[in-house]
Image (tube, grey):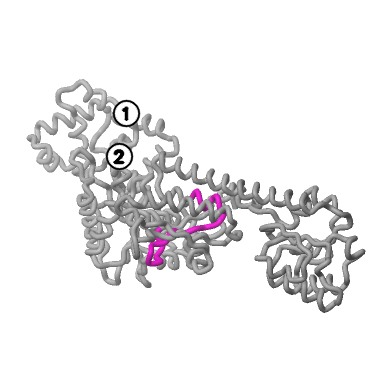
Amino acid sequence: MGPEAKIEAEITVRRALELPALRRGLPEVLAGGDRLDRTVRWVHAGEVPHIASLLKGGELLLTTGLGLGTRPSEQRAFIRKLADREIAALVVELGSRFESLPSALVEAARDCGLPLIQLHREVPYVTVTEAIHTEIINSHYALLRRADEILRRCTDVLLRGGGAPEVLRLLAVFTGNPLCLEAPDGSPLYAAGPESDDDGGPADADPLLAWESLRDTGVRIDVPGGGHGPDAVRARLVLLPVNSPVAPVHRIAAERAADLLAVVMLQSRQEEVLAARGRGDFLADLAEGRISAAEAPAQARLLGFRPGAEPVLPVVMRLPAGLPTPGSWALLAQALREELAAPGVPVLLGVRPVEGRVPLLVALRAGQDRAALADRIAEALRAGVVRAGLDRPTAHRPVVVVGAPGDWAAAGPGLRHAAEAAAAAQGLPEQPWYDARRLDIELLLWRMREHGEQEVLTDFVERAIGPLLAHDRGARQPLLPTLEAYLASAGRKAETARDLNVNRQTLYDRLARIAQLLGTDLDDPQTVLGLRLALRARRHTDKP
């Protein structure tokens, strides 16, 4: 729970007794000592027997006891009526009527759970009233100030390019509880929870499962839609009391943030991208092990993915750097969802704008060919990119990587492997899709670069093919394409000559020149392996 959630939002009976105005009366708690954390809504002073009928609940009642009655039955009835009105506490000043409070009064208060306090010294009621009312007003001012602060932080996030998910995560941290944004039909659009503990541990409760369990008891706040009738509500923000009750300041902050969310969601198809980002967060949490294999099926069902007992196929599409623009993610999410409906298999698709990738899980039906399904999924993904207007001629095509099918225990590692393989495959010769299992060398080299071993890769490339690269920088006829074609054809010279559209003698001359520059034998298997690795490693270095 965030530190804001621990701050008391209102004045309690305990706090009122600590104020100098009441402390001077030497207060003594006779009953209800375990209920002093009740909120004091207002202060009322009175001496009439029927005073309970004048109260609304939450008051701290000050009296000298003149209206309490003289008989025990009257005193017990007086206490019961106050308890029924749910007042915060009864404070009786000794001296004018009682030297000590009657046992019937004390016992009735204990039975009803009503805090009963006697004052041993006289205090001016007007001073007590002013002091407590000042505390109440200051408390409400503090609530509004804290709500304004979280609204300012939400606005700053939006001005820096964030969206509704970032606003919702800020609110979750502020309240110390999970929350969920629902569509008008009650389906989840986006669930957010408090941040992880300082030691990197998981949050206390998964927000999606918390929403399923507590949505009927959560605090609901409408996000206005700007219309009438069915269009009056665009979405609903549900605050879930998991770690602590929903405090007044949390409700105030959420109500103000709801107006901000309404403005954000006026943009076209924001519900679509919100839902897609929510699914993307689930898939990312699954990939990183923050969601266990035992929890995953239930959460996936809430998101509309029900593969049954069939294995799931992890797939990741990575978009080129700079694509798409922030406003294009909604178009892309909708286009991908519509295109993926064509294959007719259960699909769970999410978007991860920060990483520029689209993770998904696909159900692989019994007897269905993995390669054929991968072809259809990759085709649908690329069609969605085209429909969203993101297939730019000057940019590389998106990279689609397909992992190995498996159960839920394998789904998370499979998604993580596919995501890393998609990053490693950037710049490879274009294919409709890449098999994650055949990218292990690329992935190894990519991980070396990501973990600060780029200098090692650069040195390896320089040792293996440095002289050839140096030659090509000043040559009219570069030799590196010849070496690449030769290795790609597994050393078959006729095929290499045909691919390069040169005669065999020209090829033999070029290969001899390459062998001379590198000081090596191109027919040696170990040399060929080293050259293959060097060409792949070159993609992961900064040197051209």
Which labelled disc corresponds to residue 322? 2
The kind of residue tagged 1 is: Lys
Crowdedness near tag 1: few (<14), some (14–19) or many (≥20) residues, C-alpha within 10 Å: few
Residue 282: image location, x then y, percent: 42, 57
Residue at 26 percent of width and 27 percent of height: 469
Is 336 drawn above or below residue 70 in the view shown? above
Q: Is residue 81 magenta?
A: no
Whether residues under marks 1 and 2 lie with C-beta atoms below 8 angstroms apart, the answer is no
337 or 491: nearer the viewer = 337
Which labelled disc corresponds to residue 543? 1
Which labelled disc corresponds to residue 526? none
Q: Is residue 437 visible?
A: no
Residue 366: image location, x then y, percent: 30, 72
Residue 141 relative to residue 437: left or right: right
Residue 234 relative to residue 1: left or right: left
Name the element at disc 2.
Answer: loop
- Label 1 and label 2: CA atoms lie apart by 22 Å
Q: Which residues are magenta?
A: 169-189
Mark 1 or 2, nearer chain start: 2
Crowdedness near tag 2: few (<14), some (14–19) or many (≥20) residues, C-alpha within 10 Å: few
* Total count of labels: 2
Q: Is residue 216 visible?
A: yes
